[in-house]
Image: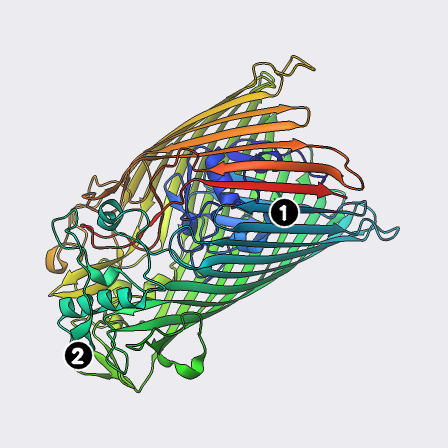
Amino acid sequence: MKIGARRHVSHGAVDVVSRQTMNEFVTGTNPNAILAYTTPGANFTSSDALGLDAVADTLYVRGFNLTQLGVTMDGIPLGGQGFGNAYGLSIDQAEIQENVTSIAMSQGAGALDTPSTQTLGGAISYTTSDPLNKAGGQVSQMFGSYGAYRTFARADSGKLNDTGTKFYAAFSRTDQNLWKGAGGQDELMANFKGVQPIQGDRGKLTALFDYSRLDQDNYMPLTESMWKIMGRKTTYSMPNWSKAKGFACANAANLGLKAGGCAGVTLPDLPMGLDGQPIDPGNFQYAGNQYQQNYLSALNFDYKLFSNVTSRTVAYAQVSNGDYGNTQLGVSSPDGMPSAWMGQKSNTRRIGFTQNFDIHAGDRNLIKTGLWYENNRFQLPEYLWADQWDGPHDVHDYSRGSSTKWWQKNFNSNTFQFYVQDTFTITRGLKFTAGFKSLTETQNNNSRVNPGWKTVGNAYQLNGYNIPFYNHQASGSLNASNAFLPHFNLDYHFLQHHEAYIDIAENMRPYDTTAWSGLGSWHQSAQQAFNNAKYGLNGVAKLKPETTWNYLLGYRYSSPVFMLAADFYHTEYYNRLISVTQTVGGYANGQYLNIGKERMFGADVLGTIRPFQNMTGSWLQGFALTNSFSWNNETYRNNAVPGLGANGGPLNLRGMHQVYYPKFMYKVDLAYHYQRFSFDFNANYNAKRYMTYTNDMKIPAYWTSSLTASYDFGKLGFAQNFKATFGVTNLFQQNYIGGVYGPASVKGDQNPNMFVAAPREFFGTIAARF
């Protein structure tokens, strides 16, 4: 039994990863990781071997991160892809990996018909498999290092009647202990998809329901000093409460806080950091974790209204709930213990629809037009739970009854997008596409602080808690609109195997929830910081939506033996927005700033050779070698960014390189297939990444590597395609920084936002179809 799918082929500015390619990696690997390991210009990092850590997972495509890319699945907008599901859902929490048949990445400016407010520099579209026409099923069981196991099962109904009704239901469960520290990662997913053809092949109604539950203990983020000096296994103290108390008391001493119970506590002996300053004990927390539940449902209705007009309608809804927390040092619990558990309980509700029409106007014109509307509601309250001198709060207990509420944010947005484009066939093989989209989004945040809190000096107090740092949310509204965002594309197929293409577009990205979060200090309220940015007051540059002009020139040669692709691209980036915290007047001051212009030049080259492709029947025929090289030079252009310099003054960032993205990447993949045996070796080189805006600190270059081998035994008893797979991740046991989470620092090494990648791990899988 085989899952049917169209043959997906890269074309124009779009790179496509097929199901066959995904099968060459360890079972259950995050689809975004596979995309990055095989596609030039893409970079994925994480803290675990499968890429399941929602905090540490980091994906960049040509300098743009996941919050700046448009993402859809079967035409369903997946929204923002950042941690916390504030206004979207990531693919690894939406769809079981085995049900994804292809990943298409537009490395130009993204298609006009992509329903997304995030699209600044490209788009990713995932396609899932339809139910099979014949009843059947498949199962797989994976085991691996650190107690890992993964179970997958899928049942297809086959056609149930003459009209072609069919469906499938699938389930997966992934569980693994953390490779350092206590705890584990547990993910459960369920997918359902039903298809009902209408009037034969004239139309199709598709119903989709996805559920996921993620229960993870996190890895502790590190500074470069903590990683290089104290080692890759530096992590949370859990379950060693005595050790945790030592860090909490050392931090209290640094902050000048009174904690009488610290008299008999053994303090840690911390070394000096790379910057010559002692490593901050406040970065060593007891624990951190997250719990998420996600529900995604959609109805897709495709119907040929006339012989030349096709309608595509998608109605969708997402509900997500989450608990996120960690030990907060410096916050005094009611009994005087200088730490407390600080957690957030999020609630997201997205609902919307898209309506698209494809109109064939004569033999030369294909007109596409459509609209998209979405309403998003996001609620995020923050609570405190008390630690005790004789033991910590139960880190998995998020019950409100034992908590004290600090504040709550209530975010709401309404989005409307319209587009129209025409693809004109100039001559055989030569097509020109022109169009535009209109986008508007209105956002409002209403923040409320528990009225019981009182300010005593530079601290908040309530119910025995003492919080010595400033943390408020701002309230207010922002609007981002642009009636004309043009897009042009020229695609020319010539001399049978050759293709050349040009892609030019302007894009806009509205603001995100960080515009209201983490702002202000004891000297300047969060509301004042927000107002300064919104209206351009007190020397702060006025907030404007981020916009880009993207230019792409590409060439591709495709034949059975050899494939070559080369792209050169340029982006002009306007109104670059960043979240940053600076020390002003001795106090941390959070800002959401417009730092002006950014400019990017880059190039990607990829070549695949199958030297023995024409030797039919030979054991050599299945060899394929792919190499790719990427170069990206992205620099900030503002020579006087307000608010980033000493004491809140201006700072010259002109010529500084983009943070978190490597300037050079090299990828190699060696694949071999012979009869029932398959083998794949993959390695990626990623150059250094700057971790501060002034480029004074950097994450070193590193290699990633993986190896998989499989054998299909064919029919064994009642099982078809009984297959065994063995895989190794981080094959060469590299010690490197994987994911990076949170805003970059302006300078220095006091920001713990780096996650060490997992060591070498081994996985084995058996799978069968019925």
For the C terminus, which image quadrant?
Answer: top right
Image quarter of residue 127: top right
Identify the element where label 1 is drawn.
strand
Amino acid type indicated by mark 1: Gln
Q: Residue furthest top?
A: 615
What number is the disc on residue 260? 2
The picture places residue 439, in percent across and down from the top left corner, at 47, 55
The picture places residue 115, in percent across and down from the top left corner, at 53, 52
Identify the element where label 2 is drawn.
helix
Does residue 414 appear left or right of residue 5 in this picture? Answer: left
Does residue 709 appear left or right of residue 521 in this picture? Answer: right
What number is the disc on residue 351? none
Q: Nearer the viewer, residue 718 or 625?
A: 718
The picture places residue 484, in percent across and down from the top left corner, at 45, 49
Q: Residue 557: tell me if it is visible.
A: no
Q: Residue 715: tell me if it is visible.
A: yes
Does residue 335 appear left or right of residue 202 in this picture? Answer: left
Q: Does residue 393 lie above or below 717 as drawn? A: below
Amino acid type indicated by mark 2: Gly
Instruction: Tell me whether circle 2 and circle 1 mark residues in contact (CB < 8 Å).
Output: no
Other-residue count near label 1 (Cα within 10 Å), few / some / many at <14 / 14–19 / ≥20? some
Q: Of the residues under marks 2 and 1, which one precedes in the sequence? A: 1
Does residue 92 appear left or right of residue 127 in this picture? Answer: left
Residue at coordinates 53% horizontally, 31% vertically from top-left? 12
- What residue is shown with label 1? 141
CA gap, disc 2 to disc 1? Answer: 53 Å
Residue at coordinates 48% horizontally, 57% vertically from top-left? 185
